[in-house]
């Protein structure tokens, strides 16, 4: 579960995106740039979702603010099909992904999981164990994910991981996958529950390593 901050001026869109987020994540919504900059400090989001359109410069101004203040968080742009060159300019300012509004649930989940994983790839670290893992029989969850696996590289590769903490203690068991494709194409190989659920078992074509694999095999 990620803490998401949404900057969007349209009330209907904020409600729609909050409903999408509530399936797996926690979202705080704001309707102005000033509120967004204050919320970054008070709520400590892990991901920011910002509206991009031709009417306001909120997304661009937010990216500039983050750059000036050295705030390193993944920013996902959300907007209509006409975002065009504005979207490309925002990417140059540091935005990590773009998703067209409105979107299906699986598309929203994929862009969040992908952005979080890319951020971990850049900075290291392991995500906290999710609420689903805490509440579910971990052996059954492992079997379910292996059964639902779509990506050819992940077939029967989901396993239960416990880390040695020292003094005879180990971490709480969780599901993990060591992906050979990610390792092959220069990404850290280890991925965890939400990435496995949304990418490996959902839509592997959204995974950067899988995309490189497809490009190589189709060349």
Image (cartoon, rainbow, N blue to C red):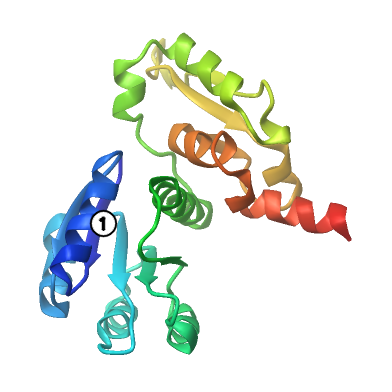
Front one among 122 and 199: 199
In the displayed structure, would residue 189 be above or below residue 172? below
Give the residue furthest to the right.
219
Which residue is rendered at x = 46% and y = 31% of the image? 193
Tell me if I can see residue 44 in this picture: no
Quarter containing the C terminus: bottom right
In the displayed structure, would residue 10 be above or below residue 152? below
On the image, the x and y values in percent for residue 172 come to: 37, 17
Which residue is rendered at x = 25% and y = 88% of the image? 56
In the displayed structure, would residue 155 be above or below residue 191? above
Quadrant of residue 29 within the rendered picture: bottom left
In the displayed structure, would residue 219 be above or below residue 83? above
Q: Is residue 172 left or right of residue 215?
A: left
Q: Which residue is mark 1?
A: 17
On the image, the x and y values in percent for residue 145 come to: 54, 23
User: Within 10 angstroms of label 1, few (less than 14), some, or many (20 or more) residues?
Assistant: many
Which residue is rendered at x = 77% and y = 53% of the image? 214
Quarter containing the N terminus: top left
Q: Is residue 31 left or right of residue 181?
A: left
On the image, the x and y values in percent for residue 216 come to: 84, 56
Front one among 190 and 48: 48
């Amino acid at each position: 579960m990620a803490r998401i901050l949404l900057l969007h001026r349209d009330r209907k869109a904020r409600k729609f995106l909050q409903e999408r987020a509530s399936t797996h994540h926690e979202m705080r919504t704001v309707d102005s740039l000033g509120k967004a900059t204050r919320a970054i400090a008070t709520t400590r989001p892990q991901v920011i979702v910002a509206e991009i359109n031709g009417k306001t410069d909120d997304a661009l101004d937010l990216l500039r603010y983050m750059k000036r203040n050295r705030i390193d968080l993944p920013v996902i742009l959300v907007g209509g099909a006409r975002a065009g060159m504005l979207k490309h300019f925002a990417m140059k300012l540091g935005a990590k992904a773009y998703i067209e509004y409105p979107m299906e649930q699986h598309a929203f989940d994929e862009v969040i999981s992908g952005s979080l994983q890319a951020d971990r790839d850049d900075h290291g670290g392991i995500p906290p164990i999710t609420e689903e893992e805490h509440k579910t029989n971990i052996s059954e969850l492992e079997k379910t994910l292996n059964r639902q696996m779509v990506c050819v590289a992940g077939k029967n590769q989901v396993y239960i991981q416990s880390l040695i903490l020292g003094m005879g203690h180990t971490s709480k068991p969780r599901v993990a996958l060591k992906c050979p494709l990610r390792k092959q194409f220069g990404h850290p190989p280890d991925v965890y529950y939400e990435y496995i659920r949304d990418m490996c078992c959902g839509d592997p074509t959204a995974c950067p390593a899988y995309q490189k694999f497809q490009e190589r095999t189709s060349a």
